[in-house]
Image (cartoon, grey):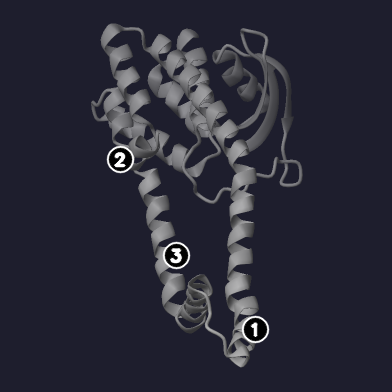
Amino acid sequence: MAKYGYEAIDKIGKETKGSIEANSEEEVKNKLRSQGLTVVSVKGQSILTQDLNIQIGGYPTARDLSVMCRQFVSMNKAGVTIMETLRMLYEQTENKRLKDALNEVRVGIEKGDTLAQALGDHPKVFPDLMINMVAAGEASGTLHIAMDRVSTQLEKSSRTQALVKKAMIYPTAVFIIAIVITIVMLVVVIPSYETMFVDLGTELPAITKFYVAMSNGLINYWFIIVPVVAGIAAGIVYFSKTNAGKHFLA
């Protein structure tokens, strides 16, 4: 199978681009039309013309899932079966974890699971919102409506996350700079002044003694302090990615 890049327009007139594996350009066009897309152009891709996509194996973002749901809705409205829809989504998906999960979802459905049950086997890939909405859609016979609502909600979530990340850039940079300056003060500046204080032979103020003690502690026990701080930071990051952590930080 070769890889083809395409440009198409969906039913609401929005331009969409992507890549898909197929045996011929005609097969690509047929797949796109089955999704309710109007084909603008299809071109074969070589290694040099493919979009650069470095995949480190991260979990799909809210935007990835939103796009997937939109495609699912388009194909569902076009009368494509769920199994065929999942196969097409599998072929078009670039994210490795999402691709593997979609393949296992197909296997689960073939074994007799519902779509919601199959999605529920991958809680790290598909959020609870999506699983619950799909279950409700299957029960009421309005799966395409449920997936459309999931897509809308995930899109809003993606925009919110982007705004939060953008807003956090400045305070994070300030915090890092402050930490670096503090370490330099404790490791370089204060030790140089400590000798001068000793030569003067005067009683140091309590606050100065405190900073000198901090400086000596950091210099003499850095091999203990650094792993402890790194462990605490790693623990916070890990906790923030768990369901309990997400609810706590929400």
Residue 1, can we see it? Answer: no
Q: Nearer the viewer, residue 45 or 168?
A: 168
Sequence-earlier tag: 1 or 2: 1
Give the crowd class for mark 3: few <14, some 14-19, many >=20 residues within 10 Å.
Answer: few
Three-letter residue code for mark 3: Ala
The answer to which of 219 and 111 lies nearer the viewer is 219
Badge 3 is on which residue? 230
Q: Residue furthest front?
A: 202
Residue hosting label 1: 192
Where's the N terminus, which quadrant?
Answer: top right
Disc ID at residue 26 = none
Q: Is residue 102 above or below residue 145?
A: below
Q: Can you name the residue that lies furthest to the left here?
A: 112
Q: Give me the residue at 37% from left, 56% from top.
A: 235
Q: Residue at x 34, y 43 (%)?
A: 242
> Residue drawn 58% across and 70% down?
183
